[in-house]
Image (cartoon, coloured by chain):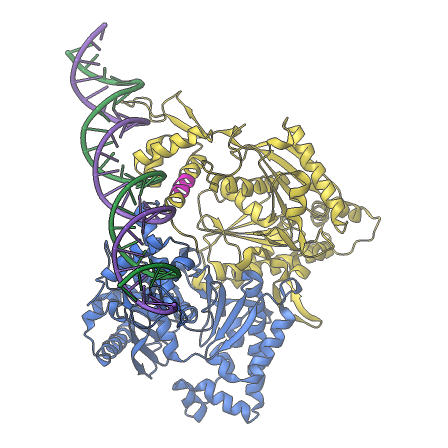
Chain colours: A blue, B yellow, C purple, D green
DNA sequence: TTGAATTAATCCGCATAAGGGAAAAATTGG
DNA sequence: CCAATTTTTCCCTTATGCGGATTAATTCAA
């Protein structure tokens, strides 16, 4: 049981102030006081400590109010970009994308490795990731020991608390203690997180959920993932497990249960393409969905049918998720969106059909084609949140460089 | 944004101490200190204030440690049963059950009204509930103004925060502000909550989830409900909405979507029975499931088939819920369990088939045939939790009588 | 029976938090 | 240059939790 002591109190208020500054980008103390309901005295004390720790900066130029304002001008407070650096990564079956960001989550450098890594031994994958992280750090003109935290977003069922990867399409093994492995290799604390959770936070900080604290995100990639934002925090199942939507059962068929992944997973949509062909080559290079879209535009019957089937399955699963979580907004992301109209239309139709009347209109559907960089940035946000929440003054990573 | 001030700190620690005492039934200050990680000094201060407010009592008789213990004996602290009284109720389509409980949640009196209330005008239902509450209070030798809170548990989609009943099988209307209606009638603050949430808390306090803070409960009654306990608290969807499992889509059939309620809802299982017959009579009296069980024991083909179909549908839905929430335990309750083996076996089989390998074994399935009184007691627990959390010393309901 | 040992509970003083009000600081307008 | 205005800080009060010393209540042994 966590006891409430003055330290916790200060940690909470510090985080709130820091997060308020982040959201506003630039904000005066009075406004922080208004938004957080903290007294100006307390805000002043907290910001003084944040300034002292080098987490924020004061900018005196320009008045934040209208130009004709009288009285002492407000001092703009902003996050100090240099307060920390983190690395975020999206690890997928056929590509890896790394970013280095500053304390604000702004991207400083990007590294993309386009290669198939799934089913490789762990040591090989770990080698590649380590290499990618180091390259990306060098690209940002930094040294590896200037990085405070690393967060890797990967598909599959991941136990956030321990960093164990229960199952992942990119690993042959199950139950890998990947956080420890990478932490040791890099010499930096490394967090392992579900890629869906990463992109969920990315949308909360920079994307289509900036204005709300409750929402659900569904990622339609090789794996089908889910992120639930609840009161501004990721809702992790008991034990901190991430979810795997692909395992959802849609019904029973002649050969047992029909899972969502068998209808809407990447391989289910693209099908078995003759190896060596142009399509198979595109898939291998991670361009499968884009290629599929051109084929759909050319009215390829098989693919259109597959896209429609996938859309229907997703729409139905989505309705069930909305029934359970009743979020005001649902964001859909992932490569499958590239399939275009046949997929999206059938998804929307199936959703409309399946959503119960009682909660019709509760959730707003939003589609978003984020770049891989955004996913990696989301992983960086996971890392940054850890830093925001840690009580700098007393203990934790070094505040500034 | 909730600001952290000393008052919040105090409220948190007070609640933790009170809840620790409740769980232990009888406990000394040292043990509270050990379990809550609060210093003995703080525990002493808080318990002094709780004693002062009359919420707990000190019992000096008997030593809590082994008989041969040396030193000053520990003083046992217990909840003061008389610190508050609440009314809890389970409102179903064909019966109402009321209980009055003391501050510990112990039942003081019970009232059962066996009558069909669904599809009646709201005023009629409200009349009946008012009557039931007042009778139950009199039965407990109390006056209505000695009751601190009332909580009504009803089926359907209910907005806990506002007390609005979005949809409920017992109301003709939708969007009823039932909490306000009943609060005005009774002159007592009345909470309206999903019956599934009520029974979930009942299990957490007294039943099969006493030892854990994370679990999922599925209620199989006329309506199919869900309760999710997350970190010892009910997980309410965004907006405090309760869930309606019956609206979950299982697949598509010739005439549109197939919902769980059409496979496993009470009416789906029992079917259309010729009115006037014994079965129809039993259903009208709320004995439908029990009657069905005797028919199943007599090998009624139609009913066995219906039970199996319902079990399969529930098992599949359950697997999906476990996939999403990954709880260590799932408790199944409700009248449908009375169907017996054909239902339970097919449920278990379908669940085993549908549960993905990656989380096989994380969730333990527990079946429980709670009485209606337990459901009502759960509603009382919802009310009591409000009292436990309210900062008595400063404001809130009167502490003692 | 009496004193030592032991354990529980409380008292006292300290550190730290937030908050309120007054004072200081920094600007504009006349 | 002074008055007006607004932001920020300083000083003081109150509340919290905690550590150490103190008091209280019991058992054990001589």
From this view, report whether residue B207 is shown above or below residue D7: above
* Start-end of magenta stretch: B10-16
Q: Is residue A309 visible?
A: yes
Q: Taking B52 as reference, is B353 left or right? A: right
Q: Nearer the viewer, residue A401 or A370?
A: A401
Residue D22, by quadrant, is top left
Count how many numbered circles sit on residues in the image: 0
Q: Is residue B151 magenta?
A: no
Q: Nearer the viewer, residue B386 or A225?
A: B386
Q: Is residue B207 visible?
A: no
The residue depicted at 41 percent of the width and 90 percent of the height is A281
Q: Nearer the viewer, residue A331 or B263?
A: A331
Residue A322, by quadrant, is bottom right
Whole-percent x, y for residue D30 in the image = 15, 11
Whole-percent x, y for residue B77 in the image = 41, 29
From this view, report whether residue B104 is shown above or below residue A357: above
- Quadrant into which the C terminus of chain B falls: top right
Which residue of the protein is positioned furthest toward the right in this rendering? Answer: B276
Whole-percent x, y for residue B113 in the image = 72, 38
- Quadrant into which the N terminus of chain B falls: bottom left
Residue A57, by quadrant, is bottom left
Whole-percent x, y for residue A326 in the image = 56, 62
Majority secondary structure in the magenta region: helix
The residue depicted at 55 percent of the width and 58 percent of the height is B239
From this view, report whether residue B350 is shown above or below residue A205: above
Q: Nearer the viewer, residue A15 or A90?
A: A15
């Amino acid at each position: 049981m966590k006891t409430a002591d003055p330290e916790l109190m200060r940690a909470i208020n510090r985080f709130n102030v820091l997060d308020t500054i982040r959201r506003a980008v630039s904000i005066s103390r009075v406004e922080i006081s208004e938004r957080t309901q903290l007294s100006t005295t307390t805000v002043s004390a907290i910001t003084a400590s944040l300034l002292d720790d080098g987490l924020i900066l004061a900018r005196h130029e320009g008045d934040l109010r209208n130009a004709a304002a009288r009285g002492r001008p407000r001092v703009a407070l902003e996050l100090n970009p240099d307060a920390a650096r983190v690395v975020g990564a999206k690890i997928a079956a056929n590509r890896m994308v790394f970013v280095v960001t500053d304390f604000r989550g702004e991207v400083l450098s990007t590294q993309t490795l386009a290669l198939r890594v799934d089913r490789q031994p762990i040591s090989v994958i770990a080698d590649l990731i380590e290499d990618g992280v180091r390259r990306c750090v060098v690209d940002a003109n930094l040294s590896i020991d200037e990085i405070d935290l690393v967060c890797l977003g990967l598909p599959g069922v991941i136990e956030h608390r321990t960093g164990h990867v229960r199952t992942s399409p990119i690993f042959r093994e199950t139950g890998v203690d990947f956080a420890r492995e990478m932490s040791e290799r890099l010499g930096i604390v490394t967090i392992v997180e579900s890629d869906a959770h990463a992109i969920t936070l990315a949308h909360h900080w920079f994307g289509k959920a900036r204005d709300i604290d409750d929402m659900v995100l569904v990622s339609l990639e090789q794996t089908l993932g889910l992120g639930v934002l609840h009161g501004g925090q990721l809702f992790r199942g008991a034990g901190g497990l991430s979810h795997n939507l692909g395992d959802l059962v849609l019904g029973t068929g002649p050969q047992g249960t029909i899972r969502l992944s068998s209808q809407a997973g990447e391989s289910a949509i693209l099908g078995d393409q003759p190896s060596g062909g142009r399509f198979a080559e595109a898939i291998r290079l991670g361009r499968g969905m884009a290629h599929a879209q051109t084929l759909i535009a050319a009215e390829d019957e098989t693919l259109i049918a597959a896209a429609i089937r996938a859309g229907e399955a997703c729409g139905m699963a989505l309705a069930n998720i909305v029934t359970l979580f009743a979020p005001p907004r649902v964001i859909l992301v992932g490569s499958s969106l590239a399939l275009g109209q046949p997929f999206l239309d059938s998804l929307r139709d199936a959703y409309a059909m399946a959503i119960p009347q009682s909660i019709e209109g509760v959730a707003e559907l939003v589609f978003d084609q984020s770049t891989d960089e955004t996913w990696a940035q989301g992983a960086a946000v996971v890392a940054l949140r850890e830093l925001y929440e840690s009580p700098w003054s007393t203990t934790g990573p070094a505040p500034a460089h």
